[in-house]
Every structure is written in C-alpha cells, then in structure tokens.
Image (spheres, rainbow, N blue to C red):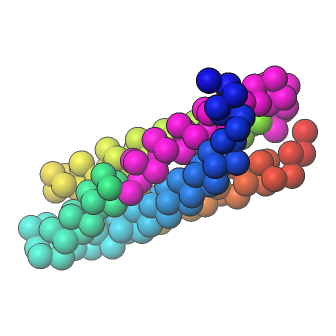
C-alpha cells in the first residue's frame, strides 16, 4: 500500500489542493449567503432561493470537498509520517484544519437553522463569521508553504 501511495504521491497532492480550493470557495461563500439571507422575509421566494443555494453548496460542493481534502491529506501523511510528525508547523496546520472542519460543521448547522426559518442571528454576526475561514486559510497556507518551525 505504501508503495502505491509513494508512486502516486504527486497525484494525491494535486487532488488535495483541488479539494481544498473547492472547500474554501464554499467556506468563504456560504456565510456571505447567510448575510443576505438574514434580510430576506421568511417564506418569500428570495428566502426559499437562499435555502436552496445554501443546501446545494453544502451538500454538493463543500462536504464532498471536505471529505476529499481529508482523504488525500491522510494519504500524504501516511507517505510522510516520520517527517511530518516531527514538524511543529505540521502540528499547528493540522490543528487549524481540524478547527476549520469544526467550523464547517457549525455552518452545516446554520444551514439547517435557516431551512427551518429559525435564524435569530444578525447580518453582522454572519459578516464576522465570514472572515474566520479567511484568516484560518491564510495561516494554514503560510504554515504549509513557509514551514516556519
């Protein structure tokens, strides 16, 4: 198995990067949809459209991309476990990606809250949350590329 992973490592790395890009696109866009959805009248055509957009973004793009991100990451970790497990930057990156995955779960919950017309949060609340994945993404990329420690 490890020979297969090592032989195809660059493919796994490329697929990992593609999955991360798709996942991050959704993580950056979904809370922006929440910002606009807050102002839509419950039961309106606009609100129902936002519900459809949020559900489809989560179900067909974000969640599959999250799964693919983790799958290809695990394969790369298996191939480089000795080196990665001794690298401080990797531990920090792994923790931040784990936190990002948790935020994905929170966003999933909020999609359900909006679907039930039960949102109680303000547009400002979602604007703040719209920035959290951005900040995490920047730090994660800097850790992965610069490997500062």
Q: Position of residue 121 (x, y in %)?
A: 33, 57
Residue 65 magenta: yes
Asked if residue 74 shows in the view, the reply is yes
Say which quadrant the C terminus sits in: top right
Q: Residue at x 73, y 54 (%)?
A: 141
Magenta span: predominant SS is helix
Q: Position of residue 8 (x, y in %)?
A: 66, 41
Q: Above or below — where is 51 with respect to 44?
A: above
Q: Position of residue 126 (x, y in %)?
A: 43, 61
Q: Residue at x 9, y 67 (%)?
A: 43
Determine the residue located farthest toward the bottom in the rendered image. 46
- Compared across the picture, whether 69 is left or right of 63 comes to right
Quarter residue 73 falls in: top right
Q: Above or below — where is 22 with respect to 68?
A: below
- Compared across the picture, whether 145 is left or right of 56 comes to right
Say which quadrant the N terminus sits in: top right
Q: Position of residue 100 (x, y in %)?
A: 55, 44
- Compared across the picture, whether 61 is left or right of 15 comes to left
Q: Magenta stretch?
A: 61-89
Quarter residue 123 falls in: bottom left
Q: Residue at x 54, y 45 (%)?
A: 69
């Amino acid at each position: 198995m490890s020979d297969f992973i090592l032989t195809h490592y660059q493919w796994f790395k490329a697929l990992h990067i593609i999955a991360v890009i798709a996942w991050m696109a959704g993580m950056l866009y979904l809370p922006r949809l929440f910002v606009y959805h807050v102002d839509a009248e419950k039961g309106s055509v606009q609100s129902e459209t936002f519900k459809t957009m949020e559900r489809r973004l989560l179900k067909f793009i974000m969640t599959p991309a999250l799964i693919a991100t983790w799958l290809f990451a695990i394969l790369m970790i298996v191939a480089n476990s000795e080196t990665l497990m001794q690298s401080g930057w990797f531990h920090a990156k792994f923790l931040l990606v784990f936190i990002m995955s948790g935020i994905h779960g929170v966003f999933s919950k909020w999609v359900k809250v909006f679907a039930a017309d039960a949102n109680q949060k303000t547009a400002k609340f979602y604007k703040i949350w719209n920035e959290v994945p951005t900040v995490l993404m920047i730090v994660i990329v800097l850790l992965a590329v610069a490997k500062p420690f």
